[in-house]
């Protein structure tokens, strides 16, 4: 089984947002960090947003953030949102199958077990696990440089009213 580029970059986008915790992530910055087109990331953003894995904030100072804590987003959550099909063989597809063994084939059973094992492993890893496995992720993604370029928030704007 081979995962699509959509799934690959969806995971990367979520990792970027997790590493940038507490700040909104902007699509142009994510695209630059990974060397991928902004248009492609916007396409991926839609199913992630619909599934509640990310939240988007519109406007001049808008961006993207995780829809729930990184430790609550499993790789399986991402894969089931971004992959269209898990058909590993013709037997898994709906419709007319030309094989006379379709209802009694050992291959079908073996592939189904393999797919279930694959999903089980994906449920054991969260976006948080992937980010914490790379202590230098902020540096590698250019987040430190990006944060330095942003205008600082004024202290008066963040101070509680007296």
Image (cartoon, rainbow, N blue to C red):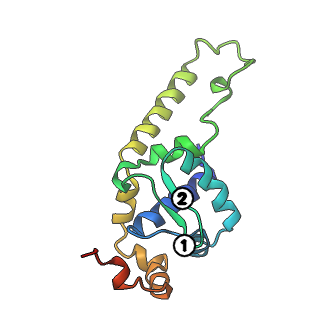
Q: Is residue 35 positioned above or below 111 on the image?
A: below
Can residue 148 be seen at all in this image of the molecule?
Answer: yes
- Estimate the x, y position of residue 111 in percent, counting from the top left: 54, 29
Q: Nearer the viewer, residue 25 or 88?
A: 25
In the image, what residue occupies the spot 54% across and 19% down?
106
**Which circle's residue, 2 or 1, is located before the other in the chain?**
2
Q: Nearer the viewer, residue 48 or 89?
A: 48
Q: Nearer the viewer, mark 2 or mark 1?
A: 1
Q: Nearer the viewer, residue 40 or 107?
A: 40
Q: Is residue 21 positioned above or below 125 on the image?
A: below
- Estimate the x, y position of residue 159 in percent, counting from the top left: 30, 78
Can residue 5 be seen at all in this image of the molecule?
Answer: no
- Estimate the x, y position of residue 77 in percent, counting from the top left: 47, 44
Q: Is residue 83 positioned above or below 95 on the image?
A: below
Q: Nearer the viewer, residue 73 or 119?
A: 73
- Estimate the x, y position of residue 27 in percent, counting from the top left: 59, 68
In the image, what residue occupies the spot 71% across and 17% down?
99
In the picture, the quarter occupied by the N terminus is: top right
Q: Secondary structure at mark 1?
A: loop
Query: Few, some or many C-alpha atoms within 10 Å of disc 1 (few <14, some 14-19, many ≥20)?
Result: few
Identity of the residue furthest to the left in this view: 162
Query: Few, some or many C-alpha atoms within 10 Å of disc 2 (few <14, some 14-19, many ≥20)?
Result: some
In the picture, the quarter occupied by the C terminus is: bottom left
Query: Label 1: which residue?
Result: 61
Q: Which mark is residue 77?
A: none
Q: Is residue 121 positioned above or below 13 on the image?
A: above
Query: Label 2: which residue?
Result: 56
In the image, what residue occupies the spot 63% across and 73% down?
35
Marks 2 and 1 in Cβ contact (< 8 Å): no
Q: Secondary structure at mark 2?
A: strand
């Amino acid at each position: 089984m081979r995962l699509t580029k959509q799934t690959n970059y969806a995971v990367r986008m979520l990792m970027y947002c997790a590493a940038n915790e507490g700040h909104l992530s902007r699509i142009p910055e994510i695209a630059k960090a990974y060397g991928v087109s902004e248009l492609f990331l916007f396409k991926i953003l839609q199913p992630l947003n619909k599934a509640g894995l990310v939240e988007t904030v519109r406007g001049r100072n808008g961006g993207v953030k995780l829809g729930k804590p990184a430790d609550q987003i499993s790789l399986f959550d991402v894969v089931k949102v971004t992959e269209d099909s898990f058909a590993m063989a013709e037997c898994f597809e709906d419709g007319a199958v030309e094989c006379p063994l379709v209802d009694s084939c050992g291959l079908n059973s073996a592939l189904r077990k393999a797919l279930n094992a694959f999903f089980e492993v994906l449920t054991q890893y969260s976006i948080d696990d992937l980010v914490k496995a790379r202590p230098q992720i902020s540096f590698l993604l250019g987040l430190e440089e990006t944060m330095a370029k942003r205008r600082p928030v004024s202290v008066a704007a963040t101070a509680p009213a007296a």
